[in-house]
Image (cartoon, rainbow, N blue to C red):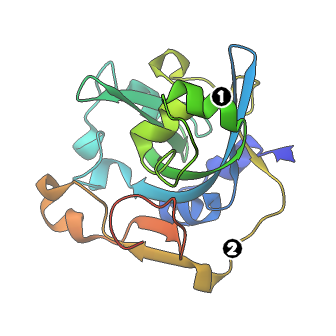
Amino acid sequence: MKKIPLKFYRRSDVAQVAKELLGKLLVSTIGNKKTIGRIVEVEAYNGIVDKASHAFNGKRTKRTSIMFADGGVAYIYLCYGIHHLFNVVTSNEGDPKAILIRALEPVAGFDVMLKRTDKRKQDSFLTSGPGKLSKALGISISQNGQQLNGNTIYLADDGVVYSKNEILSSPRIGIDYAEEDALLPYRFYKANCNYVSGNSK
């Protein structure tokens, strides 16, 4: 298992990077407890031209400023004041593109994940959603802005590559406000995976 180099993220085609993230590992070591999940669902957000993006039309706020950094850092924000959503910033400085990690397949640290999510046994709902996976891996906005080749949170490659037939796409979930951009097929997920969130499992 090798950490993914920063150059992987620093490409302008966010949809391509998103597809290539499928099968990679998200690793967290928080509170001296290591948890690992395999990425099985993502959503790409194409920066200033994407009406679904927090940075649409170049909008820059205190919350979204990290999106304008060089790729390879975490963008974590609170949704509804409750759920911590983990995103991977891509492209280069000034080009605010990002990928939301929507679902993971647990790989290691099962007991820790169960305790964090108040579950008694592992099931397909443990990490099947962006808020759920962050809770299971102990990810919060306190890690916002961290580089993804560090030791607290990082992405890694253990050689797993999904075939083209295993990767499906659809419009993103819950972005009706994005008008015509809501129809873009920027959600990518592994076929026949119980951990995929939402519909089209």
Q: Residue at x 63, y 48 (%)?
A: 9
Task: Please indicate whether residue 61 sits to the left or right of residue 111 in the image.
Answer: left
**The quarter of the displayed image where residue 61 is located:** top left
Q: Residue at x 48, y 36 (%)?
A: 86
Q: Earlier in the sequence, mark 2 or mark 1?
A: 1
- 2 vs 1, front mark: 1
Q: Position of residue 14 (x, y in %)?
A: 50, 58
Which label was assigned to residue 54?
Answer: none
Task: Please indicate whether residue 179 sits to the left or right of residue 123 in the image.
Answer: left
Q: Nearer the viewer, residue 164 or 65?
A: 164
Helix, strand or loop under label 1: helix
Amino acid type indicated by mark 1: Val
Q: Contact, CB < 8 Å: mark 2 with mark 1?
A: no
Q: Position of residue 158 (x, y in %)?
A: 83, 55
Tag count: 2
Which label was assigned to residue 162?
Answer: 2
For disc 1, the neighbor class at 10 Å (few under 14, some 14 to 19, many from 20) is some
Q: Nearer the viewer, residue 17 or 38?
A: 38
Q: What residue sits right under mark 1 in the picture?
A: 112
Amino acid type indicated by mark 2: Tyr
Q: Identify whether 90 is placed above or below 62.
A: below
Q: Residue at x 87, y 48 (%)?
A: 1
Q: Which residue in the rendered view is the most extreme toward the front? A: 120
Q: Position of residue 18 (x, y in %)?
A: 54, 59
Q: Is residue 169 visible?
A: yes
Quarter of the image that includes the C terminus? bottom left
